[in-house]
Amino acid sequence: MKKTNSFCVCPLVSGSKGNSVFVSTPKTAVLIDAGLSGIEIERRLTLVGQTPEQLSAIIITHEHTDHVRGAGVLSRRFNIPVYITPKTLDACTGLGKIQHLNFFECGTPFDIDELRVVPFSISHDAQDPAGLTLSFGENKIGIATDLGIVTGLVREHLKNCHLIYIESNHDPEMLINGPYPWSLKQRIKSRTGHLSNMDTRELLSDILGQNPDPDVIPDLKHVILAHLSEENNCPRKAAMEVAKGLNGSGIALYVAGPDYPGEMIRL
């Protein structure tokens, strides 16, 4: 793994086909979810100059296949500890035997070497889904994908982040007029489904609005839009809608995708 003095974040894959985010400090590297095959996760790490042998942990946010597909294989192949809630583990059918298993509970912070992790509950159709903030030094990142509504708890944890990795799943009109059956459309729109571009715009606008003084520079410097639907959204539409909530603040906006890793962002 390339050692840096930075707090780094890089989406390896994002979308319904798989999800995984690489986060590192000078001495610690973790994956948030591992939703591709072990071989493909390893290949994508290589593309961004990293190796799975250097991973300190894999943190699982919930049990859906597009978040856990390669976690068990990677853990066994490279002796990587897995962090997961007990309810999520019970709901995982394909994880397999994990030698180094570490349980966490939403609401209880824990440390992985020099990385401080704070898991918080989110609203999604999973057993015990978690959003996360990860802190190193003075920098804090927030990760919240697969959530149907933005609660006060979500807003509280994501405020004062320097980078937010947030779901922007669908455009409402594309969803309603798209090919999905009505039952699936209702699931996506529900309180335990997925955020729309407008939901994400409003969340970021609220977070920036918590500090109304125009002379105070906001902590937030980077926003990565994640988990875009390939059928019910497009990167340009998501970015244009969410940018409206950034209030011309100069915050860098990125869109994570399914086919190749994103940019390695250094805080």
Image (spheres, rainbow, N blue to C red):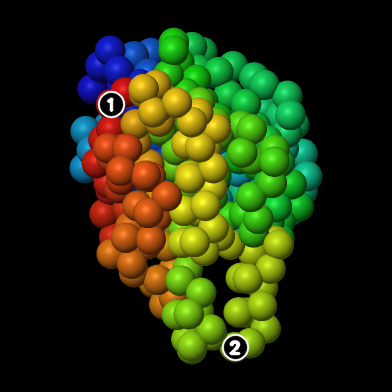
Looking at the image, is mark 1 or mark 2 earlier in the sequence? 2
Residue 145, numbered label: none
Establish if 134 lies above or below 257.
above
Can residue 229 be spotted in the picture? yes
Q: Is disc 1 placed on a helix, strand or loop?
A: strand
Q: Position of residue 3 (x, y in %)?
A: 26, 17
Q: Residue at x 32, y 60 (%)?
A: 240
The amino acid beneath tag 1 is: Arg
Q: Is disc 2 placed on a helix, strand or loop?
A: loop
Q: Residue at x 42, y 50 (%)?
A: 245
Image quarter of residue 242? bottom left
Residue 266, numbered label: 1
Image quarter of residue 86? top right
In the picture, which quadrant includes the C terminus? top left
Residue position for label 2? 181
Establish if 32 lies above or below 261.
above
Q: Position of residue 192 (x, y in %)?
A: 70, 61
Can residue 71 be spotted in the picture? no
